[in-house]
Image (tube, rainbow, N blue to C red):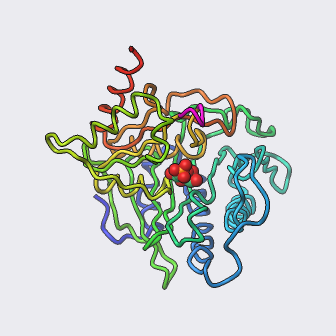
Amino acid sequence: MPAKNQTIGEFIIENQSSFAYTSGELSRLINSIRLAAKVVNHEVNKAGLVDITGAIGGVNVQGEEQQKLDVYANERFIETLTNREIVCGIASEENDDFITIEGQNCDHKNKYVVLIDPLDGSSNIDVNVSVGTIFSIYRRVTPVGTPVTKEDFLQPGNKQVAAGYIVYGTSTMLVYTTGDGVNGFTLNPAIGTYYLSHPNMKFPETGKIYSINEGNYNHFPQGVKDYIKYCQAEEGDRPYTARYIGSLVSDVHRNMIKGGIYIYPKSSKSSNGKLRLLYECNPMAFIVEQAGGKASDGFTRILDIKPTELHQRVPFFCGSKKMVEKAEEFMENASKK
Ligand code: P6P
């Protein structure tokens, strides 16, 4: 068990050998992400004081109004990853297409690609509610030395080598996995250092919190409606408690600590739901599974879905294993009617 209050640097060095890739590149990649997160954290925390909140009048590929901090965060992560020549390609929620990183020698010699949601939940910024960054890392599948292709990004989530999130909340935390469990680091902003505050995080097998936007109830599939009524029934350990922040990273992070389920289902308004597979659902699913939880689209394991598009959306059921299994049971029963 790692020593509590290790810095993230000490943790990475100590666990270097347990990384699947001991070349040190993955460690440097994680290090560059945590550096960019410190810069973004600084801006997020003073958003109310300087003119960096609000919309910029543009929309992203999702058709969502871009917030100034969305664009700022996107630029910081892309710049940090590009300058260190650690990755050969980047895909971001804020960019229509993926970005090829050639390197100073235009040699495409790096072997990792990163997919990122630079600032998830950004509509919460102006109301001072926590937001997050989500990242996913793969080894490229096309030959090193050639430009990356879309194939390098459209890999199933079970091929991820690392995934993590930063939650900019009452404290700023970096939580990530390299496939060997999940560890959480809290930033001490006074000295700009992350300390191991949540070693070996485990998702409670069950819980009493359900997180879903019930305003869309009338548009949900019958199985979701049935599960919500199950959560609300006066029976056994129920009714459960409804908690919905409207920020995926914050809702899943809370549920990973307290136990719970987060659901963003498809609906008659959005046929595949709202969340994106590549840079939201896959990384969160990898982390949740590594902590002992479960993540599916209501029927199929998220990490086994073969992506077809960079920005494709999937329904998302994620959290305590027994709670996700119960929700899947309602989805299965409703699908037979
Ligand atoms: P709704 C933020 O825009 C986000 O992608 C997730 O972080 C969040 O859980 C969800 O959308 C909120 O969506 O439709 O409930 O406002």
Question: Does residue 56 lie above or below 283 as drawn?
Answer: below
Q: Main secondary structure of the magenta part?
A: loop
> For the point 49% across and 43% down, which residue is it?
216
**Closer to the camera, 258 or 226?**
226
Q: Which residues are magenta?
A: 267-271
Residue 108 figure quarter = top right
Q: Residue furthest front?
A: 218
On the image, the x and y values in percent for residue 119 come to: 61, 60
| Residue drawn at x 54%, y 40% as measured from the top left | 160
Instruction: Assign the N terminus to one quadrant of the image.
Output: bottom left
306 left or right, relative to 198: right
Residue 297 in sight from this viewpoint: yes
Query: Would you place residue 111 above or below residue 171 in this image?
Result: above
Q: Position of residue 287 (x, y in %)?
A: 43, 46
Q: Can you say whether 205 is above or below 82 in the image? A: above
Q: Is residue 274 magenta?
A: no
Q: Determine the residue located farthest toward the top in the rendered image.
A: 336
